[in-house]
């Protein structure tokens, strides 16, 4: 018997050892050593590994099915779009040049002459294939609306046509897009879509694209760094793409998802080189010797209400709320000053904003007066809807709850799970839902869908015919001198109507270690990796 | 065989005193016990629960529980003092010179080791000269000696696969493995059926005769004393109250407790359906002994006489004969029990 | 023994079927439609309703639940446990990626917990009512009172940030070797091991105390055996028999992992995967994960029962 017992003991130990051993191998320990940072003695320009923090867990490389920002980043590094916005301008990547017709209905892109990472030439066929796949209903892509307004789109989507007539490729390096109606902002929307190789994905059935392993481990890319392997389920290894026309000096880039606190700690220990930092941690990070940079204007944190279901339908009530919240104090105390208040939901570009907008400074008395004028019923419960989990938002909503109650609005915090949120929005039952809205720093017309009557992106279901007219006119001209006064009027309406409560425009704070050179979040994050080197 | 002054005793206990520290204070469980054990003799130790008989035996081997200690007296084995000896010394004595068997063989044997393994353990410790094969054959030999059938097969079994009587035999085999000079048997038959009892007693007797081991037989059953003991001690409340040969004790008890024990035995002649002649009262709680003579509360001889306020000395009545009662003479003159 | 195993296997299969049915139905009744959630109404550009409908039809989510169930079972026999609704990855791959990491971490931490716990408990029992005993019990009480995530954060702060001795998170660095993997394992496994040891300390102490009172301990001493031998071979050997049962109770956590620890240490295990799948109503992943875990738990419990019989000769299956 003791023999059987010893046998069982040995088996148990062996099992644990085997599991340990087995589990040790998948998490990416192949014996080949990468060029360690220490051996690049005086050469600061070539080689080295860089470790980058992904703010969310990456799920797929498919640009059609990107579920979060991290997906956008990794897809944007491995594949590339035609152009990106840098600062307040466009920077062409796969598009060398572009032309917009005078009547703003025809866009011509001249493509970069380059190859995919497997040597296959990059051609306009890839672009057409990608755009049509974005638009196809069977793909079920969350960006299908980007092609709205292209000639022949409706026929294509309804199955009456095999291709979109407004998308043509006169030759291998030219793409021409024709719209039904002039739209100045169209180019940004389309130009920033990420292009995938037709010769890899073209043969896969469209409704299988979401699940194809080719988007889990893409074999062909075009960015400066391309996918090499999933080190673990949360960590991706990128290697330089020799075919890329962009710089690729590093040996490896590792993009890893970590919880925010962990990333912050790892910046200090040097286990990670670049990471986002919460506003509250900025001072501590600086004190620890981390280089902190800000990307401003990431988005406006706002409170949205379903105007069609009534509680806040009266504009006076919304104005009252603007006066009731001490937004400057929130910026100073919760965000450490790393934000700015905005008086209008359309907070950028700066040329659209006139300097005579009403400033809703903190004034509880005025708020009460407005509420009285609106015959506000103090017994009505107003829900402050929030998906909990981010410290900034949680703190902000608590403060807002108090400040609204102080002026006589029966405001209550209402925490929702992501599943409930969808239902809440679909049923139009949100009173003051906190969410962040981003605007293009270059092209204000991209935001039209959020303000115009009946648009699906118009979360508040706000409608003002006068505003619609102004925005429509402004999108029909490319001349800023013409557009500016139109936008100024539009902003005045938005400022007065308060379709949603703009709280503050937050900065995205980034930390990087001294090892990293060339990192500038205002130009871009992971998708600008071609500029990075390590020492 | 009676103990004579010419044979040196193999074991000598003098004024042994043991105390336990408990939550209620210090308890003196054994109070000045003395006796000698001659080589090869069978000594019976009779008493009720709480009389201190088991504790005395455990104390001899230094096996008291953590809260107990020997506070006085001496125990000599062939003249070598065991009280206060080092643990190493005691370990070399236990299982080799002095072995012990216990009352309940089911709980006294390790349930997860085979019988062979448990005996082997003892052999390995004390019979260094034997190699593995030697030990194996010795184990079979021992099991044969205690008359366990199918010894080879049985050796590989576990205690729960044995019957009560067989377990006790196995324990005896284990105790005898290294041919000890003394075997302490703590109520070895109490937990067994009457028929099995007789077999075990026979076995012990045979083993003793074959090996010349001295046997200390602790029991509360006078019948056992009558069967096997050469001499016997009667213990009460931590003290020896009477000594003598079995015949002497039975014929003429010189302590009221002994007399009471004898009288309380039911005999086959008791057909009148009357009550048993039990000794009135309860055995004393060792933590709260009565002052003076411990037996006084239950004694019909005391009758309030003042001498009983003092604990009686053990008076020597003859060769190996003693009694601790102020009025033992009165008992000598009383009617002989039928 | 053979008939016992066969009987158990039969019961296990029935259990598995029952669980799969119940779970399948339950997940569909929880409010929240995963397809709707996937297409975020706040950011979707295009015809969201059409997209939702298209995907629901493709996944067969509009069929009655029993029909969906049959389809799922049929696919299982083809070796396909479905695809994650969020990432599109095959469920089998997802679990195969993450489960080993959890087993690895939980396995090592359980070993640590047992070794620490039993050693501590035994020592406390042997030195009952002395300073050592009180200190051990007090220490255990203290540990169980402090949440493990707090200890984890403290440890990361001290050992990772301040002293820099150990990595702050992750399972390894890419291309790290054995030594690196062990360095990454020390904090999470150590913390979980120490937290987990508390239960074992108390149990081992009481089991050992029980055993120390047993008659066979006196018999063993009376044979002149050395003290270590008596304590180990006779005492410990009996005290540890119930360990198999205690261990088998912690088997489910071996596969479920600890969400908190995995999140804190960025450990790519099943704890976080399961929580995310549930929050996102990712039915295929939830079903796949529960099925596989159930199978593993049933198998391990069977092995535990067999081991128990091997370890205690009084048990006959």
Image: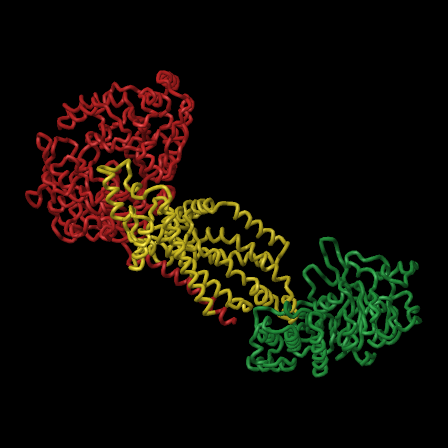
Quarter residue B99 falls in: bottom right
Quarter residue B187 falls in: bottom right
Give the left or right position of residue B285, taking residue C182 as reference.
right
Residue located at (25% from left, 49% from top): A42
Which residue of the protein is positioned furthest toward the bottom in this rendering? Answer: B210
- Percent of width and height locating residue A171: 6, 44
Q: Is there any visible trace of residue B90 in the rendered image?
A: yes
Residue B262's place in the image compared with C115, above or below, is below
- Percent of width and height locating residue A476: 13, 27
Figure colour of chain C: yellow
Q: Nearer the viewer, residue A67 or A26?
A: A67
- Percent of width and height locating residue C283: 34, 48
Q: Nearer the viewer, residue C59 or A528?
A: C59
Quarter residue B259 falls in: bottom right
Figure colour of chain A: red
Give the left or right position of residue B206, taking residue C230 as reference.
right
Q: Is there any visible trace of residue A265 in the rendered image?
A: no
Q: Which chain is green?
A: B
């Amino acid at each position: 018997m003791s023999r059987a017992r010893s046998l069982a003991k040995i088996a148990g130990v062996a099992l644990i050892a085997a599991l340990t051993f087995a589990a040790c191998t998948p998490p990416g320990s192949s014996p080949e050593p990468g060029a360690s940072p220490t051996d690049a003695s005086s050469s600061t320009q070539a080689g080295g590994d860089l470790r980058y923090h992904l703010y969310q867990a990456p799920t797929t490389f498919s640009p059609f099915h990107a579920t979060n920002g991290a997906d956008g980043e990794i897809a944007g590094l491995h594949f590339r779009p035609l152009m990106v916005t840098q600062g307040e301008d466009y920077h062409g990547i796969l598009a060398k040049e572009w032309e917009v017709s005078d009547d703003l209905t025809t866009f011509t892109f001249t493509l970069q002459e380059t190859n995919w990472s497997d040597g296959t030439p990059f051609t306009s066929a890839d672009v057409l294939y990608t755009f049509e796949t974005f638009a196809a209903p069977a793909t079920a892509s969350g960006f299908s609306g980007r092609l709205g307004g292209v000639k022949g789109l409706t026929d294509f989507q309804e199955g009456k046509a095999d291709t979109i007539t407004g998308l043509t490729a006169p030759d291998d390096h030219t793409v021409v897009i024709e719209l039904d109606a002039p739209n100045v902002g169209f180019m940004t929307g389309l130009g920033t879509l990420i292009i995938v190789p037709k010769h890899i994905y073209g043969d896969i059935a469209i409704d299988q694209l979401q699940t194809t392993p080719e988007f889990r481990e893409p074999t062909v890319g075009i960015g400066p760094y391309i996918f090499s392997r999933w080190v673990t389920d949360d960590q991706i290894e990128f290697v330089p793409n020799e075919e890329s026309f962009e710089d690729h000096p590093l040996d490896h880039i590792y993009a890893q998802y970590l919880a925010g606190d962990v990333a912050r700690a790892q910046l200090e220990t040097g286990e990670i080189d670049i990471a986002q930092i919460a506003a509250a941690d900025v001072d501590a990070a600086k004190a620890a010797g981390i280089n902190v940079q800000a990307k401003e204007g990431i988005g406006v944190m706002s409170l949205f209400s379903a105007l069609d279901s009534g509680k806040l339908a009266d504009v006076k009530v919304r104005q009252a709320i603007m006066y009731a919240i001490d937004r400057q104090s929130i910026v100073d105390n919760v965000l450490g000053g790393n934000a700015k208040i905005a008086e209008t939901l359309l907070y950028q570009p700066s040329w659209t904003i006139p300097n005579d907008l009403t400033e809703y400074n903190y004034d509880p008395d005025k708020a009460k007066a407005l509420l009285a004028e609106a015959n506000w019923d103090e017994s009505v419960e107003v829900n402050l809807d929030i998906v909990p989990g981010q410290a900034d938002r949680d703190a902000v909503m608590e403060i807002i709850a108090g400040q609204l109650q102080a002026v006589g609005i029966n405001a209550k915090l209402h925490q929702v799970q992501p599943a409930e949120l969808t239902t809440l929005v679909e049923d139009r039952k949100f009173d003051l839902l906190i969410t962040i809205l981003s605007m293009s720093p270059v092209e204000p017309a991209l935001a039209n869908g959020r303000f115009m009557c009946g648009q699906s992106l118009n979360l508040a279901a706000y409608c003002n015919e006068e505003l619609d007219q102004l925005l429509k006119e402004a999108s029909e001209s490319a001349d800023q001198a013409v557009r500016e006064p139109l936008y100024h009027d539009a902003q005045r309406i938005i400022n007065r109507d308060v379709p949603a409560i703009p709280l503050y425009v937050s900065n995205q704070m980034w930390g990087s270690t001294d090892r990293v050179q060339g990192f500038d979040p205002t130009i871009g994050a992971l998708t600008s990796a071609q500029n990075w080197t390590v020492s | 065989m009676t103990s004579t002054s010419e044979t040196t005793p193999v074991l000598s206990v003098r004024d042994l005193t043991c105390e336990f520290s408990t939550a209620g204070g210090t308890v003196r469980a054994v109070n000045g016990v003395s006796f000698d054990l001659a080589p090869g003799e069978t000594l019976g130790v009779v008493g009720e629960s709480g009389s201190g008989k088991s504790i005395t035996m455990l104390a001899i081997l230094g096996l008291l529980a953590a809260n107990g200690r020997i506070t006085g007296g001496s125990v000599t084995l062939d003249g070598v003092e065991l009280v206060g000896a080092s643990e190493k010394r005691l370990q070399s004595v236990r299982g080799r010179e002095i072995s012990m068997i216990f009352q309940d063989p089911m709980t006294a044997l390790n349930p997860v080791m085979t019988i062979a393994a448990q005996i082997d353990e003892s052999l390995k410790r004390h019979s260094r000269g034997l190699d593995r094969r030697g030990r194996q054959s010795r184990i079979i030999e021992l099991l044969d000696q205690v008359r366990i059938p199918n010894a080879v097969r049985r050796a590989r079994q576990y205690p729960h696969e044995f019957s009560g009587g067989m377990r006790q035999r196995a324990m005896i085999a284990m105790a005898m493995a290294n041919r000890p000079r003394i075997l302490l048997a703590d109520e070895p038959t109490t937990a067994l059926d009457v028929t099995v009892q007789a077999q075990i007693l026979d076995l012990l007797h045979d083993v003793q005769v074959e090996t010349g081991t001295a046997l200390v037989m602790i029991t509360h059953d006078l019948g056992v004393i009558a069967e096997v003991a050469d001499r016997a001690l009667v213990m009460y409340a931590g003290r020896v109250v009477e000594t003598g040969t079995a015949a002497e004790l039975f014929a003429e008890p010189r302590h009221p407790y002994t007399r009471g024990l004898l009288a309380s035995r039911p005999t086959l002649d008791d057909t009148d359906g009357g009550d048993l002649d039990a000794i009135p009262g309860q055995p004393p709680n060792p933590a709260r002994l009565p002052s003076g003579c411990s037996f006084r509360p239950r004694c019909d001889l005391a009758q309030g006489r003042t001498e009983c306020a003092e604990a009686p000395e053990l008076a020597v009545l003859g060769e190996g004969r003693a009694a601790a009662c102020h009025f033992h003479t009165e008992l000598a003159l009383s009617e002989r029990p039928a | 023994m053979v008939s016992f195993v066969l009987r158990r296997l039969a019961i296990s299969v029935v259990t598995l079927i029952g669980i799969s049915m119940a779970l399948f139905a339950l997940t569909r009744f929880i409010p929240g439609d995963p397809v709707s959630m996937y297409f975020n109404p706040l950011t979707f550009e295009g015809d969201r309703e059409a997209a939702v409908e298209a995907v629901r039809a493709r996944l067969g989510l509009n069929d009655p639940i029993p029909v969906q169930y049959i389809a799922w079972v049929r696919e299982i026999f083809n070796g396909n446990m479905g695809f994650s609704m969020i990432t599109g990855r095959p469920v089998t791959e997802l679990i195969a990626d993450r489960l080993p990491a959890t087993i690895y971490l939980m396995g090592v931490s359980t070993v640590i917990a047992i070794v620490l716990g039993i050693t501590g408990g035994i020592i406390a029992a042997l030195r009952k009512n002395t300073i050592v005993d009180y200190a051990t019990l007090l220490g255990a009480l203290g540990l169980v009172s402090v949440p493990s995530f707090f200890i984890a954060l403290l440890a990361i702060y001290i050992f990772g940030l301040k002293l820099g001795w150990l990595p702050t998170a992750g399972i390894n660095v890419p291309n790290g070797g054995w030594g690196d993997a062990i360095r990454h394992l020390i904090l999470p496994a150590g913390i979980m091991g120490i937290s987990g040891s508390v239960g074992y300390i108390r149990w081992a102490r009481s089991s050992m105390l029980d055993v120390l009172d047993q008659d066979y301990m006196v018999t063993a001493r009376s044979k002149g055996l050395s003290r270590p031998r008596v304590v180990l071979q006779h005492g410990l050997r009996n005290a540890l028999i119930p360990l198999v049962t205690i261990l088998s109770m912690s088997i489910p956590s071996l596969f479920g992992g600890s969400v908190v620890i995995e999140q804190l240490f960025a450990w790519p295990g099943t704890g976080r995967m399961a929580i995310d799948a549930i929050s996102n109503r990712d039915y295929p992943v939830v079903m796949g994960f529960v099925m596989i875990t159930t199978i593993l738990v049933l198998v391990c419990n069977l092995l535990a029962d067999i081991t128990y019989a091997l370890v205690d000769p009084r048990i006959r299956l």
